[in-house]
């Protein structure tokens, strides 16, 4: 999360090119949405698994990042693929996500843009698809969120490749076990992994290459492989120390 924000700052002021970043998580990490109460997390249970907790700068509900491909797109407000309204830019990027997942032979569709997920009673993000998210038979496959700042735009999201999506229910607070079990059942009914759809695992690198091809073809880009600059690394380290690894940010609500 610190790297994503460092990239947002650098690309937004022209110190770096607009960036597509593809990454994974180790160890697994629960990310909370910007305005999600920290009290919804069972910290003792998280620690028992050796997992971590972070708060995103984007909205939405909790996501357990593990066994997945995570992407982020950062750029200035006038970047052609990011300009306009949130939904306009979200739709453009969703088009690339749609092409990427079809490249992996997934029978995906794009969620209709006429409605949004306003269900804030459930602490888990992947339960219901929102506008322009990628689905299979109505079940969410890729969840995304966007933050717009004066300096630029950040959109990031995740595509679960394998594993049990209901693991997140074990580390969230529910008033009783019956509600936890209902959350598990709802999650199974409304979200899925790439492996669940295809009946076989897809390697992270295979998925990443599909994303690269799709972003180039769909958005008319020529991507260049690069490493973080020294300035980006230093800023990410600052943000980690002062914000993302600090209770004043993670536990602020």
Image: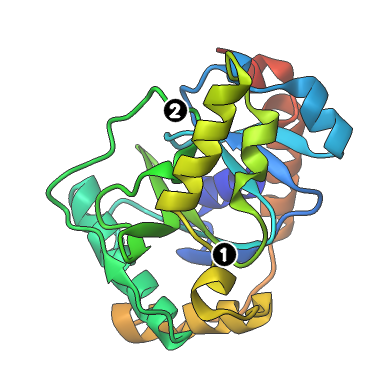
Instruction: Judge depth for marks 2 and 1 and give the one in front.
Output: 2
Q: Is residue 29 left or right of residue 77?
A: right
Please name the residue shown 75% across and 48% down the image: 28
Q: Secondary structure at mark 2?
A: loop
Q: Is residue 88 left or right of residue 167?
A: left
Number of marks drawn: 2
Instruction: Report the disc number at residue 21.
Output: 1
Please report whichever mark, 2 or 1, sits nearer to the chain's N-terminal start. Answer: 1
Say which mark, if any, is on residue 122: 2
Q: Which mark is residue 76?
A: none
Residue drawn at the location 72% of the way across and 55% of the way down: 25
| Spot occupied by residue 9 in the image (x, y as percentages of width and height) | 51, 45
Q: Quadrant of the N terminus?
A: top right
Residue at screen point 65% across, 23% down = 41
> Element under label 1?
strand
The part of the image, by quadrant, that contains residue 178 is: top right
Q: State whether residue 243 is above or below residue 113.
A: above
Image quarter (top left, top right, bottom left or bottom right) of the C terminus: top right
**Residue 47 placed where, x, y %?**
84, 30
**Considering depth in this image, is 140 or 238 the residue closer to the camera?**
140
Tell whether 89 sits left or right of 20: left
Q: CA distance from mark 2 to mark 1?
A: 29 Å
User: Where does residue 166 sit, x and y in percent of width and height?
Assistant: 61, 45
Q: Are marks 2 and 1 in contact (CB under 8 Å)?
A: no
**Residue farthest front in this picture:** 178
| Residue 154 at least partly seen | no
The reply to whether residue 214 is visible in this rendering is: yes
């Amino acid at each position: 999360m610190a790297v994503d924000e460092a990239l947002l700052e650098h690309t937004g002021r022209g110190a770096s090119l607009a960036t597509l970043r593809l990454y994974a998580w180790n160890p697994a990490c629960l990310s909370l949405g910007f305005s999600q109460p920290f009290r919804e997390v069972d910290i003792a249970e998280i620690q028992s698994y050796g997992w971590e907790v972070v708060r995103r700068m984007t909205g939405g509900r909790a996501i357990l990042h593990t066994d997945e491909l995570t992407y982020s797109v950062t750029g200035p407000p006038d970047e052609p693929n990011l300009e306009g309204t949130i939904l306009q830019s979200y739709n453009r990027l969703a088009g690339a996500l749609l092409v990427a997942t079809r490249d992996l032979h997934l029978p995906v569709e794009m969620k209709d843009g006429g409605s949004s997920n306003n269900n804030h009673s459930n602490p888990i993000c992947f339960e219901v698809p929102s506008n322009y998210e990628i689905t299979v038979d109505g079940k969410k496959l890729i969840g995304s969120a966007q933050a717009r700042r004066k300096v630029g735009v950040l959109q990031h999201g995740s595509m679960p490749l394998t594993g049990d999506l209901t693991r997140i229910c074990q580390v969230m607070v529910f008033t009783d076990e019956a509600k936890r079990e209902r959350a598990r059942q709802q999650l199974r009914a409304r979200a899925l992994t790439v492996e669940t759809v295809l009946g076989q695992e897809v390697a992270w690198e295979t998925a990443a290459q599909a994303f690269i091809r799709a972003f180039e073809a769909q958005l008319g880009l020529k991507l260049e492989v690069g490493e973080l600059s020294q300035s980006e690394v230093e800023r990410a380290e600052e943000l980690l120390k002062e914000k993302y690894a600090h209770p004043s940010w993670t536990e602020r609500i």
